[in-house]
Image (cartoon, helix red, strand yellow):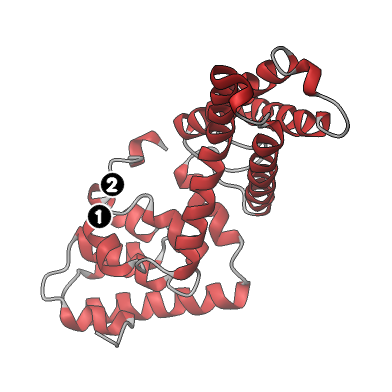
Amino acid sequence: MSDRTLTSLVDETDEWGPLEWWRLELRSFARAPYAQHTLVMLAPKEAVRAEHPGISAGSCLQSLAYMFLLVAPLVGAAAMLRWVVGGSAFDFPLAFAGVLTLISFLATAWSQYQRFRRPRAVSQAGIRTTSLMHIVPGLFTALVAITAGRELLDGGTWVWLVVVLADVVAYAAILIRGATIKGGPQNPHDNVDQSMKEIPPSTLSEILAERDAAIDLLAARGKITPDVAAEARATAPGRLALTVAPEGGSAYYRPDQA
């Protein structure tokens, strides 16, 4: 369907329930993808499949960068292990591990910049997993370099050891900091509120005007009661579905946990 307006959603839906409220919420923020993503984390899967954009070139590139960020230190550590086991059969791979770590470190720096630019509360389990996938192989690489490879740390080779250790320190700091940033969102509901603040005021006003017009249309057609319409219009930006249809949300973060 090419017509993705809120009016078209009202037109095509005979029964209006929790799923439809979430679809309306997601569709209303289609022009503000960062805000829409915070709602995607709380929305039911059916609404996400219907309203959230599918795979794009940008999302593919981002996913590949994240995968590289995760596996680069492991590949470097595996190369160091192969060198220890194989001995002189292989060249000292610290530079190889260092280059992989450096590229990964740059990706980390970019992701952390984006996190401070658009602060979000994230999963503590995710932070722990990502951090340990850098800290553990990084320490292994460094340990091999300063023990079995000590005599080969000549010239500029030691620079790559510094790179590996810098990555370890960075992820240790990320792990200690945890899933939230001081003064930033503390949970997924706060993420929604923060994302609304990032939308330009003129754009947000247009989004709310279109949302309220759709609510008025629902009431005029008898799909919702005047009381529900009044409650819906009174909700803050991004809080429509969370307020009038909390039971339709995902299990990721229930309203009673906010």
Q: Residue furthest front?
A: 89
Place of residue 106 in the rendered image (x, y in percent of width and height, measured from the top left): 69, 48
Nearest the viewer among 224 and 156 is 156
Residue lying at 81% horizontally and 24% vertically, measured from the top left: 153
**Is residue 139 left or right of 213 when viewed as pictured?**
right
Nearest the viewer among 178 and 163 is 163
Q: Is residue 149 visible?
A: yes
Place of residue 25 in the rendered image (x, y in percent of width and height, measured from the top left): 35, 66
Q: Residue furthest left?
A: 14
The label on residue 250 is: 2
Place of residue 52 in the rendered image (x, y in percent of width and height, measured from the top left): 35, 66
**Mark 2, other Cα within 10 Å: few <14 / some 14–19 / many ≥20:** some
Measured in 3D between alpha carbons, the distance from the residue under mark 2 to the one under mark 1, in whole angstroms, is: 7 Å
The label on residue 45 is: 1
Q: Secondary structure at mark 2?
A: loop
Q: Quadrant of residue 135?
A: top right
Q: Secondary structure at mark 1?
A: helix
> Which three-letter amino acid code belongs to the residue tagged 2?
Ser
Nearest the viewer among 100 and 256 is 100
Q: Which is more N-terminal, label 1 or label 2?
A: 1
**Is residue 97 left or right of 230 when viewed as pictured?**
right
Asked if 45 appears above or below 127 in the picture, the reply is below
Label 2 close to label 1 by CB (< 8 Å): yes
Please name which of the two marks, 2 or 1, marks the residue nearer to the observer. 1
> Which three-letter amino acid code belongs to the residue tagged 1?
Lys
**Mark 1, other Cα within 10 Å: few <14 / some 14–19 / many ≥20:** some
Quadrant of the rendering where the C terminus is positioned? top left
